[in-house]
Amino acid sequence: MRHRKAGIKLNRTSSHRDAMFRNMVTSLFKHERIKTTDAKAKELRRWADQLVTLAKRGDLHARRRALSIVREKDVVHKLFEEAVERYGGTSGGYTRLIKIGRRPGDAAPLTLVELAAADTAKRRKPAKKKKTAKTAPPAPAEAAAEEKTTAKEEPSLESSAAPEQASAAVEASATDISAAAPEAKDAEESSAVEDEKQTPKDD
């Protein structure tokens, strides 16, 4: 029974397994991404998160614990220098697993393990939406009263418009008559002159 025994065995001895994951996590922090199988990638995430947590602490004891896992001092120094700036705003999710298909030889599922970037590591709280005041629809009684008032106002507008149209028509007819009156007078005078010319004078 494997009660309270974390991690996977991968059909290897403990010394072989520890040495393999030490090498893998060192390569991960050196190159910031490595390619491995799914089972190893999930276990490697535990190792990488533990080291980033030690680097965020930043004290001497945390540095010595990291050196007991990663045996390259340059890699540990780089990790401790960049950890607070890169992962200071989060408490997890320092690595990203991307499935990239199967290996050509034995069809083992492959995964790309990479360190999360600084901008994606910072988790921002979603902005709260402002509540807009909703206008209540008018009550049925008020709506009926408004319809009645509009119905009453429409005929009054029509009735007030009718006398205006009638007065405009009277003025137009008066102007037509006044314009036609001088023309009629001119026609009468011309006809009288022609009659005088045609009638012979009595000697």
Image (tube, rainbow, N blue to C red):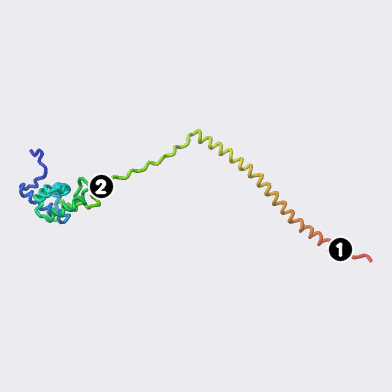
Horizontal and vertical percent for residue 167? 68, 47
Q: In terms of secondary structure, where does tag 1 sit?
A: helix
Picture disc at residue 196: 1
Horizontal and vertical percent for residue 49? 16, 47
Q: Quadrant of residue 176?
A: bottom right
Give the residue number, with chain letter if any, for mark 2. Answer: 123
In this rendered view, identify the residue nearer to me: 182 or 11: 182
Q: Are marks 2 and 1 in contact (CB under 8 Å)?
A: no
Q: Up-down: is 58 above or below 198?
A: above
Residue depicted at 72% across the width and 53% down the height: 175
Give left or right: position of 94 versus 201: left
Name the residue type under label 1.
Glu
Horizontal and vertical percent for residue 59? 14, 48
Picture disc at residue 122: none
Residue depicted at 84% across the width and 61% down the height: 192
Give left or right: position of 44 versus 182: left
Number of marks present in the image shown: 2
Considering every residue shown, the one lying at the far bottom of the view is 203
Name the residue type under label 2.
Arg
Q: In terms of secondary structure, where does tag 2 sit?
A: loop
Horizontal and vertical percent for residue 109? 16, 51
Dot 2 alpha-carbon crowd within 10 angstroms: few under 14, some 14 to 19, many 20 or more: few
